[in-house]
Amino acid sequence: MSSDHFIAGVHSVRTALKHGGDSVTGVWVETRRKDRRIKEIVSLAREIGVDVTHVGKDELDRMVPGANHQGVVANAKAPAALDERALKSLLETLQEPAFLLILDGAQDPHNLGACLRSADAAGVHAVVAPKDRSVGLTPTACKVASGAAETIPFIQVTNLSRILKWLRDEQGIWVIGTAGEAEQSLFEARLTGPLAIIMGGEESGLRRLTRENCDQLVKLPMTGSVESLNVSVAAGVCLYEALRQRKNAES
């Protein structure tokens, strides 16, 4: 069941209106803001029939405490997660090599939101996660995603191991898992072509069955005193290294 959440900031609200307009139920704009970006948001909202209310800055501050709202806030229903059929349909219609991010047991909604945002920025086609022992599209996750929850398909599957096997054996997708004890560095791995990158959970990393269904395990080089990175930070590093390699392969 979806629930309402606030989206703050010019880019996030514009993205929500363009890509998830059906979910936006209202927009609030700071009365004194008359610049081009705000006018564009007001126009987008009115085109799709979303009410726009002009309020003072103090009211926006109250709606989204601590957020940099830039004079605009929207209320939206959290998008629903998709299922395995949606993943299969998506892969059938792709016109380029698949690029997936798989989260094996992420339970912190802040991490999920940050991963969705990085996935959107890096050109990922979908984020996949198991239904059990994983966080879903909560209002917090959607808020942190800053509009990416409306643009990136988030797919929850019943049996992740089965899906990984299907991706490898039937879809020809190279499945790479991240693990601190892996021998090969991320920067030595080939990340072009059909690809799925798997990030483990915050505490336990990759589960045993997930590891067994990986084609390859890689690690991020750690040269300082800390032993690991936050999963959303590590995901961002991995996705952008893949993006770098994929862009180079195209040129």
Image (cartoon, rainbow, N blue to C red):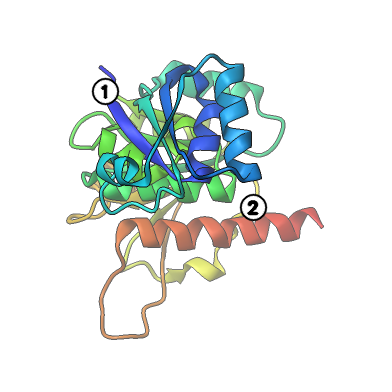
Q: Mark 2 points at which residue?
A: 192
Q: Position of residue 28 (x, y in %)?
A: 42, 32
Say which quadrant the N terminus sits in.
Answer: top left
Labelled disc at residue 237: none
Horizontal side of 116 relative to 11 (left or right) equals: left
Depth check: 135 or 74 in front? Answer: 74
Binning the other alpha carbons within 10 Å of mark 1 as few (below 14), some (14 to 19) or many (20 upward) gives few
Quarter of the image containing the C terminus? bottom right
Q: Is 70 placed above or below 93 here?
A: below
Of tags 1 and 2, which is closer to the observer? Answer: 1
**Disc 2 residue type?**
Thr
Residue 107 lies left or right of residue 85; in this view the side is left
Q: Position of residue 223 (x, y in %)?
A: 37, 85
- Residue carrying label 1: 3
Callout 2 secondary element: loop
Residue 250 visible at all: yes
For mark 1, give the secondary structure: loop
Q: Residue 230, image x and y in percent?
A: 29, 62
Residue in the image at 28% along x and 49% along y: 110
Q: Earlier in the sequence, mark 1 or mark 2?
A: 1
Q: Is residue 216 above or below residue 18?
A: below
* Residue closest to the eye, 136 or 156: 136
- Which residue is pictured at 43% across the width and 35% down the height? 149
Q: Is residue 73 above or below residue 46?
A: below
The amino acid sitting under disc 1 is Ser
Q: Kindly identify the residue that appears in the image at 26 percent across and 79 percent down.
A: 226
The part of the image, by quadrant, that contains residue 203 is bottom left
Residue drawn at 55 percent across, 42 percent down: 124
- Looking at the image, do the residues carrying marks 1 and 2 touch, with CB atoms under 8 Å apart? no
